Image (cartoon, rainbow, N blue to C red):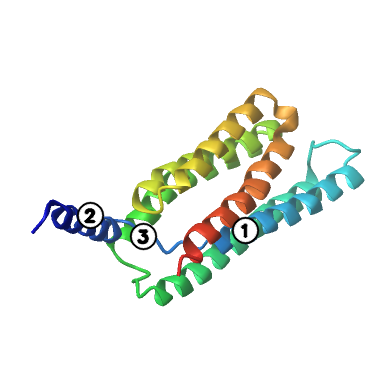
Amino acid sequence: MSNEDYLKDISEIKNLMNKSSRFISLSGLSGILAGVYALIGAAITYYLVTTYSSGTLLLDGWIFRTVVFILFMVAFLSIVTGVFLTTKKAKKNGEKIWDNSSKRLLINFLIPLVAGGLYTIIILSQGKYGQTGGLMLIFYGLALVNASKYSIGDIKYLGYTEIILGLIAALFPGYGFWLWVLGFGVMHIIYGTIMHFKYDKIK
């Protein structure tokens, strides 16, 4: 065998090992839809706050409860959509949806996300609304970076972007809402579009 044949075999072995240790069937379309859900939720929230809360982001009573409900609905719809489209893509690629790689992906994603979610709830209960946007972006970004080791490596770039936006939101809490919109809405759509054409359209 020539050196080129050896290099080709080594490359194929590396690809097989990479596929066996990473869950690569994440759907780019699910990222786009998650961004759309976030923008719709943000638009509704902005309308409620500016119409019924004297144009401020200081929330209480039914407005606060409605905004929290909207956040949960955005998260719920994003998760359901992601699971559905990812399962569909995995079946199409002949990949198992629930194996060691997907388990590692989920665990490494949820640990920072759950910790951040609980911390954000504590901050909200203390009435520190200006900090929540930054906290959500930072912990979500950390979750993406942590999970990228077991999935498509490009996810980490979205994670880095979310962390940077979160830190900016911490410096300028008055712009936390708009940075949240940028991070969870616009960046998801951009990232999902890139991933859709890079990975979903490769065949």
- Which label number is shown at residue 11? 2
Q: Residue at x 73, y 52 (%)?
A: 39
Q: Nearer the viewer, residue 90 or 109?
A: 90
What residue did someone put label 3 on? 23
Is residue 81 in sight in this rendering?
yes
Left or right of 57? Residue 171 is left
Furthest residue in direction front, as rendered: 2
Relative image position of residue 18 (x, y in whole percent): 28, 55
Identify the element where label 2 is drawn.
helix
| CB under 8 Å between discs 2 and 1 | no
Q: Nearer the viewer, residue 74 or 193?
A: 193
Amino acid identity at mark 3 = Phe
Left or right of 180? Residue 143 is left
From mark 2 to mark 1, how far is it between C-alphas?
32 Å
Amino acid identity at mark 1 = Ile
198 versus 169 height, above or below:
below
Amino acid identity at mark 2 = Ser
Q: Earlier in the sequence, mark 3 or mark 2?
A: 2
Q: Earlier in the sequence, mark 2 or mark 1?
A: 2
Quadrant assignment, res 146: top left
Identify the element where label 3 is drawn.
loop
Label 1, residues with CA under 10 Å away: few <14, some 14-19, many ≥20: many
Is residue 127 in sight in this rendering?
no
Q: Residue at x 56, y 53 (%)?
A: 194
Relative image position of residue 143 (x, y in whole percent): 46, 44
Identify the element where label 1 is drawn.
helix
Q: Nearer the viewer, mark 3 or mark 2?
A: 2
Left or right of 16? Residue 154 is right
What residue did someone put label 1 on? 32
- Which label number is shown at residue 165? none
| CB under 8 Å between discs 3 and 2 | no
